Amino acid sequence: MEALTDLVKEHAELKRAVLKEALGYLVNHPVLDDRERKVDELLVKAGNELRAKLPTEFFSNPLKFRQEIESSELFKMLLKIPKGSLHHVHFDAFGHHSYFVKYLKAHPEKYRLDPKECKVFYYKDPAAEGLSDAAEDAKILNDEEFYAKYHEYFVMNNFDLHDAKNVWEKFDLKIWNRLAIIQIKDSYLDYLKYAFAYAFEHGFHNVQGRLFLNFAKDAEMKDIPLEEEMQIYLDAQEEVQKKYPEFLFSGVIQSLRFWSNDKMKEYLGQAYALKKKFPKLIIGFDAVAEEDNRKLSDLLEVFLEYKKAIKDDGIQHFEFLLHAGESLEVDNDNLVDAVLFGCPRIGHAYNLYRHPILFDKVKQQKICIEWSPLSNQFLRYVKDLRNHPHFGIYNTGIKFSISSDDPGVFGVDPLAWDLVSIILANKFNLQDVKGFFLNSIEYSCLDKDQHDSLRNNWFKAWHKYIDTFQ
């Protein structure tokens, strides 16, 4: 028995040593002061209480428990917490779906609807011919009734999110309908002013929206000059800053990865020219869309040419912030290309777990992963959020920021839902959460003045938030 006791003691000592070594990977986590530790106790307590109330089904079907989540103390703590910079969001999918319903009701004459396909068209779109508008409903239905009839044009319901076979098709449909509502430049300006204010009111001092060039159209659905399009963002920001002077919007120009190299080169050239004209507005470039249809390596010749031009021209803060690793395919190696290419941030990187050889390279190159937990779940990359591979990778010391990707289409408040979900799934505490926010600022890719302003404004807001719990 004595020998067995010694073996148990030896095992316990080895375990303590392993766990102590594991903590060494997290040395860069922020240290909490006494005031923050008090808030941490409240956050952990709120998380434990909510976790005890929820069945394990929550981790695979979170929106089924919307009432429990949004009435919880944990959610309330995180809804307005100062969040720093939102790295990864497709801006047409950012705004709450109720905005689009209200805009449709206020301007029904501008749009035509196909109830069978649940599809919206701007009335000048040739495809709108023969379809009816919602003018009569706008007259006879009150706001609640109109919302009930039309909201699912703009947001995925829980059935959509669990329809694994058709989830991407339904997702794209909601995006289409949102674009139809806001694509005309006056409507887009209205939307941006709403969305910028909405972002700040949810704790974001900086939002870095993925944007398409030639998105905004004139009333005849014709392209407007790109300089005029960029000015729409600046005009919206200027208007919102009258109320929220700390708010800053930054644009990441997005392309579609399935474009030909010639088209990609032309488009990237347009983005680069706009960076020179609007240096504080545009901070980066991305290639989006379903990854398994085309490898990143097919585009590297174009990207390397411009990376060299950027260096030769001495242009700073125009980064390649590429989607990579958002895939379940075994042979998807886009992450290898993104890391070797030197991206300072990588979108999703879901399948990083398949490439352990990259772990040290990601840390050495100080790359930050833009993690969108609920987007990964809703788009069926992971069924049970507790099994998300990034929880394990986070413990290696790789840097993460948390994003919401497409919160409006998913029907969730930006970031609050993601934070609640990963706190419940992995028992994160305030130290982890603060670390995510600080990473969002450190890796914001802004110029020095913008970065310093963002950091100072966030810390002021953070201390004010902490004070409310003292």
Image (cartoon, helix red, strand yellow):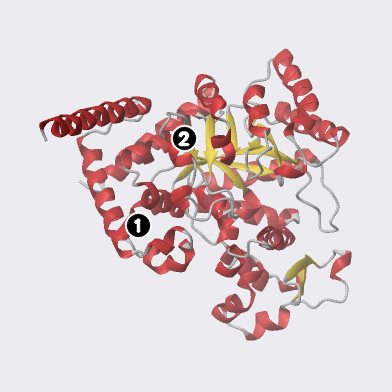
**Which residue is tagged 2?**
393
The answer to whether 93 appears left or right of 205 in the picture is: right
Q: Does residue 453 lie above or below 203 as drawn? A: above
Kindly indicate the quadrant of the structure image that contains residue 73. bottom left
- Foreground: 374 or 437? 374
Residue 363, percent from left and from top: 49, 23
- Most extreme residue toward the left is 2
Residue 447, percent from left and from top: 56, 25
Depth-wise, is mark 2 or mark 1 nearer the camera? 2
Q: Does residue 408 lie above or below 283 as drawn? A: below
* Residue pictured at 62% horizontal, 71% vertical: 152
**Residue 23 seen by the camera:** yes
Which mark, residue 59? Answer: none
Q: Does residue 230 lie above or below 155 as drawn? A: above
State the CA–CA distance, disc 2 to disc 1: 28 Å
User: Could you say whether the residue bearing mark 2 is in a helix, strand or loop?
Assistant: helix
**Residue 202 seen by the camera:** no
